[in-house]
Amino acid sequence: MVLVMSVVIHEVAHGYAAGILGDPTARLQGRLTLNPLKHLDPVGSVIVPLLTSLSGFTFGWAKPVPYNPYNFRNQKWGESLVAAAGPLANIFLALVFGLLIRFASAPLGAAFVNIAAVIVVINLVLAIFNLIPVPPLDGSKILWAFLPERFRQIRESMERYSFPLVIIVVFAVWKFLSPVIIWLFSLITGFR
């Protein structure tokens, strides 16, 4: 349930950012809601996670919140700002629950600490994973905003093969990302 809600908050953050930048698409399609049913994708949220969990590494996705970049008031940075909103929402959740664990003045129950720790880990994983600069992940949209227009063909080629590309990159970089996530978890919560 923590994973589902973290993914939902991630997607809703994209929709709110798009709305702030001038695009009402997510609101008009009823996607600015914390109701998980509006965000679940039958394949990416159910079938793929079940199959991949058998291998010991769960992978999946939610329905992306729709937006129309042509509605953005800021055409150059709009898409990258919307992309950054999702990982930033996950970082915010990780910080809130991590700092609660670290600095709570009243003793927290073991159950709360365990749930808060899971929230921190899941949100750190979601944020860092989504910041990988490979389409369709958010990091690619952030990266493309900084690159010259002449790289557009490379972007379009990468987007055509995005699913296998993401799978390959995830397995290639996960061993490098795991220590970063563990270090950040320790830094935020104070757990060693």
Image: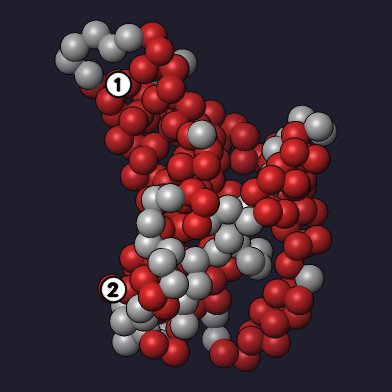
Quadrant position of residue 116: top left
Q: CA distance from mark 1 to mark 2?
A: 33 Å
Q: Which residue is mark 2?
A: 20
Residue 9 is situated, as x and y percent measured from the top left of the image, at 41, 50
Residue placed farthest to the left in the image? 105
| Residue type of the residue flagged with mark 1 | Arg
Q: Nearer the viewer, residue 34 or 60?
A: 34
Badge 2 element: helix
Residue at image coords 54%, 71% = 141
For disc 1, the marked residue is 102
The percent position of residue 91, horizontal first and vertical second, equals 40, 45
Q: Which is more foreground, mark 1 or mark 2?
A: 2
The answer to whether residue 128 is seen in the rendering is no
User: At 39% across and 87% down in the image, what residue appears?
Assistant: 71
- The image shows a total of numbered marks equal to 2
Q: How is the image coloured?
A: secondary structure
Place of residue 153 in the rendered image (x, y in percent of width and height, measured from the top left): 70, 87
